[in-house]
């Protein structure tokens, strides 16, 4: 098992990546947490054929306020916080 990356190693790793990025032959796998993916409605003109249907949902006022505060802290729309929360929940609780 590899040693954990230390904080001071990140700068050297970034410099190495900037000068010699990996080639497609060197990349063997990419593991992505769905909660970390960019979410939201595509911007106008970003491409045709992408379907992001709307869904209505109701939240108690206190939960709505919490969602809004989290969104402000993350500098994202409220809907992104909700999408991330649902994606994380579904990732942690897959349908079997």
Image (cartoon, rainbow, N blue to C red):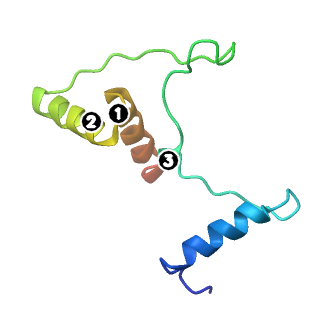
SS of the residue at dot 2? helix
The residue at 34%/36% (across/down) is: 75
Indicate the position of residue 60 as horizontal and vertical percent values: 14, 27
First along the sequence among labels 1 and 3: 3
Q: Quadrant of residue 15?
A: bottom right
Crowding near the residue tagged with mark 1, few <14, some 14–19, many ≥20 C-alpha atoms within 10 Å: some
Indicate the position of residue 20 as horizontal and vertical percent values: 80, 65
Indicate the position of residue 82 as horizontal and vertical percent values: 35, 33
Residue 93 or 60: which is nearer the viewer? 60
- Disc 2 vs disc 1: which is toward the camera? 2
The residue at 54%/18% (across/down) is: 52
Q: Quadrant of residue 9?
A: bottom right
Q: Which residue is mark 2?
A: 72
For the residues labelled 2 and 1, say whether their Cβ atoms are less than 8 Å apart: no
Residue 34 or 16: which is nearer the viewer? 16
Instruction: Mark yes or no: residue 95 visible.
Output: no
Indicate the position of residue 19 as horizontal and vertical percent values: 77, 64
Instruction: Mark yes or no: residue 38 visible.
Output: yes
- Disc 3 vs disc 2: which is toward the camera? 2
Label annotation for residue 82: 1
Label annotation for residue 21: none
Q: Is residue 5 left or right of residue 69?
A: right
First along the sequence among labels 3 and 2: 3
Q: Marks 3 and 2, Cα distance to the nearest angstrom? A: 17 Å
Residue 55 or 70: which is nearer the viewer? 70
First along the sequence among labels 2 and 1: 2
Crowding near the residue tagged with mark 3, few <14, some 14–19, many ≥20 C-alpha atoms within 10 Å: few
Label annotation for residue 36: 3
Q: Is residue 18 above or below residue 6?
A: above
SS of the residue at dot 3? helix
């Amino acid at each position: 098992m590899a040693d954990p990356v230390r904080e001071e190693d990140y700068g050297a790793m970034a410099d190495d990546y900037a000068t010699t990025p990996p080639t497609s032959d060197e990349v063997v796998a990419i593991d992505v947490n769905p909660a970390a993916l960019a979410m939201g409605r595509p911007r106008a003109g970003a491409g045709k054929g992408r379907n992001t249907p709307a869904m209505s949902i109701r939240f108690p006022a206190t939960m709505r306020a919490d969602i809004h505060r989290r969104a402000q802290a993350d500098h994202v729309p409220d809907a992104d916080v909700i999408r991330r929360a649902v994606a994380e929940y579904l990732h942690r609780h897959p349908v079997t």
